[in-house]
Amino acid sequence: MQNHEDTEAHEELYLGPWWRFPPLRNAALSGIVLAATYVLERTDVVPTGAAVALYVLAAVLGASHWGPEAVESLRERRIDIDVLMASATVGSAVLGLWEEAAFLAFLYGAAEGLEEFTYDRTRGAIRALLDLAPKEATVITPDGEKVVPAEALAVGDVMLVKPGESLATDGTIKTGHTSLDEAAVTGESVPVEKGPGDDVYAGTVNLTGAIEVVVSRTFADNTLSQIIHLVEQAQEAKTPTQRLIDRFGRVYSPAVLAGSVFLAVVPPLFGGDPSEWFRRAVTLAVAGAPCALVMSTPVAVAAAVGSAGKQGVLIKGGVHLENLGRVEVVAMDKTGTLTRGTPQVTDVVPLTELDTAELLQVAAAVESLSEHPLGQAIVRRARADGVEVTRPTSFQALTGGGAKARIGEQEMYVGSVRLFDELGAELDDAEPLVERLQGEGKTVVLVGTPGAVAGVIALQDEFRPEAPEALTALHRIGIRTVVMLTGDNRRTAAAIARRLGIDDVRAELKPADKSRAVTELQETLGPTAMVGDGINDAPALATATVGIAMGTVGTDAAIEAADVALMGDDLRRVPYAVSLGRQTRHISRQNVAFSILILVVLVPSAVLGWISVAGAVLTHEVSEIIAVFNGLRARRPRTD
C-alpha cells in the first residue's frame, strides 16, 4: 500500500495518460506477458522451462513498483501490506506455483498502480487550478508596457489586464471598470463588477474593460496558490477513522504474517502435509492483507476535499470533513452572513428640537471613527445627504452596545435601546416608534445623552438573495435546527427569522455570548456548525463542532479562524459542504464495512483451505479496486 500521508512523496504528481505512468505501464506489461504465457503454455508452443521464465518476468514487472517498498519496509523492521504480498509471491514460487505468483504480482501491482494514479489525479485536479493563472503579465513601466514572467511580479508593480485575459496574481484595481469571472477562486459563476479600489485575484478572468492593477501579492503567495496549498494539506490530514485503521494495521499486519508462519510450521510438526499447509500459509498472507480497509477512507477524503476546493470551499483537514458529516444544527451570524453586511439608513426621526439633518450630523460625528457596519452606514447616509461630518475630540467603541464620543463640550452616545436603558435614559417617548420599526425587521439605534434620547435612526440590511434557498436546502438534507445568532434586539431578530424560515433565534448577544450559545446548542441539540465572518465571530467559530467562515477570499485571518472557509459569499455552499461531509462519512463507513466483510470471509477460507491462492488474490485485489472507485463517489455530494 502506498503511504498517501507522506507529503514529500507526492510533491510531484503524475497527471499524464495512464499508459505512461510507470506502475500502471509495468502492470499492463506484466498482464500481457502473463496472459501470453498462459495461452502459449497450454498450446504447447513453449516448453515448461521457458514458461517458468516468462512467469518470473511477469512477476518482476508486476512487482517493480511495490516490491522495492516491501524491501524498504523490511529494512525498517516494519511489517506492512507490501511485506505480506511479497511473502505470498515468494511463497507461491517456492511451491512451484509460478502462474499464481505472477498473477498475484500482476494484480497487486495493477491495483496499487490504479490506486496511486487515481490519488494523484484527485490531488492534481486542484493543483491544475494554477494553470488558470497566466504565466506572463503585462507590466506598465516608465518606459512603456513590458511582458514579464508571472513569478517576477513584485508587490507594487502595475499590471495591465485586457478583456479576455486572466490575472496573474492578486492586486487592487488602480484605474478602469470591468466585470470579472471569479469562479476559479470562489466557485461562483456569476460575474462580479469591479472598479478602482476593489481587490482582484489570481486566476480570475477579465470579461469587459481594460484595467490597471497594482500587485498586492507575489505569484507564489497569491490567493490561488494559497487555496491549492491549503487543499493539499487537508488531503494529507488523517481523519479519526484513518488514524484508528492505521493503529489497527500496525498490529494486524504482523499478526497475519505470524499466523502464516504458524500455519507453515506447526501443523506439519503434527503430521500435516507440509505442501498443503504451506499453500494455506501463502493464501492467508494474501487473504489477510487489509488493502481495501486501509484505502477505505483516504481516497474518499482526497476526492471530497479536492472537489470542494474547486467549488471555493476550503476544508482544512479530514477531521473537519468528518465533523461536517456529523452536523445536526447550523448556527448563523446575521450581519454579513445572512445579510450582505452593508446596512442602509431607512428612517431618521428626531425626538427633540433637533431637525433631521442635525440629528444625522450628531450621529455621524459619533460614528465617524467607528468600524462597525451600522456606524459606517450612518456616516454614508450623512455624506449622501450633504451633511458635514465632523470628527469628535474623543471616541470609544462600546462592544455590543454602540459608541460614545465628545462633540464640543457634550458627550453623545449612539447605540442600542439596551445601552440607553443601562445609561438610565428616559425611553417612554421613543418606545412606540422603536417597537414599530423593529416589528418591520429594522435595526434601531438611539442618539442622545445619558439622560435623554435626541432621536431614533433605523437601518435595514439586505438579505443575501440566495439565503432562502440555502436555508431550505439545509432543512432538506436533514439539518434539524437552523439558529440565528445576532447582537440585534429580539423583536427585529424575530421578524427577520420569520421572513427567512429560521427555526430558532438568539438575540442581543455579545461575541462571548455567541460562543456560549454555540456550546449550549451542542450540549442540547448535537454537533453544531457555526457560520460567521471568520473574525468577529472567531470565539463562536472556535467553539463549534465545525467553524465555517463566509466570504474569506483574500482574507488570511478569516481563513485561519475557521475549520472551513467559503471563498465566496454564497450561502448555498454551506448545505453543499455539509452534504459533502455526510456523503464522505457514509462512503468511508461503506468501505470499512465492506473491507471487514471481505477479511471475515477470506481469512477463515484461507486457513481452512477453502480458497486457492489465485482465488484469494483475485478477491483481494478486486475488493481494493472497488474501495477506490467507491471512494471517488465523494466528489459529487447529493443535496436532495
Image (cartoon, rainbow, N blue to C red):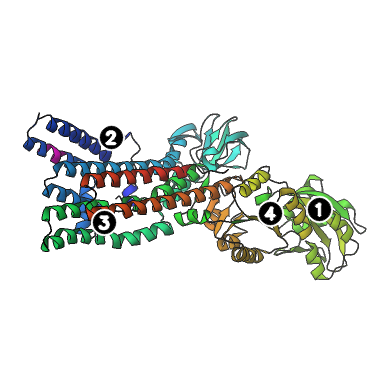
* Mark 3, other Cα within 10 Å: few <14 / some 14–19 / many ≥20: many
In the rendered structure, which amino acid carries the disc numbered 4?
Lys
Q: Which mark is residue 216?
A: none
The number of numbered discs placed on residues in the rendered structure image is: 4
User: Of helix, strand and loop, which one carries label 2?
Assistant: helix
Q: Earlier in the sequence, mark 2 or mark 4?
A: 2
Span shown in magenta: 53-57
User: Of helix, strand and loop, which one carries label 1?
Assistant: strand
Residue at screen point 85% across, 52% down = 348
Residue 131 position within the rendered picture, expressed as x and y whole percent measured from the top left: 43, 36
- Where is mark 2, residue-wise? 20
Residue at screen point 90% across, 53% down = 355
Residue at screen point 18% across, 62% down = 262
Q: Do the CB atoms of the residues marked 1 and 2 lie less than 8 Å apart?
A: no
Q: Earlier in the sequence, mark 3 or mark 1?
A: 3
Question: Gap in Å between the C-alphas at discs 3 and 1?
Answer: 68 Å
Q: Earlier in the sequence, mark 3 or mark 4?
A: 3
Residue at screen point 19% across, 55% down = 281
In the rendered structure, which amino acid carries the disc numbered 1?
Ala
Residue 43 position within the rendered picture, expressed as x and y whole percent measured from the top left: 12, 29
- Where is mark 3, residue-wise? 80
Question: Gap in Å between the C-alphas at discs 2 and 4?
Answer: 53 Å
* Mark 2, other Cα within 10 Å: few <14 / some 14–19 / many ≥20: few
Q: Is residue 219 left or right of residue 459?
A: left
Q: Earlier in the sequence, mark 1 or mark 2?
A: 2
Q: Which mark is residue 458?
A: 1
Which is closer to the viewer, label 3 or label 2? 3
- Where is mark 4, residue-wise? 334
Question: Gap in Å between the C-alphas at discs 1 and 2?
Answer: 67 Å
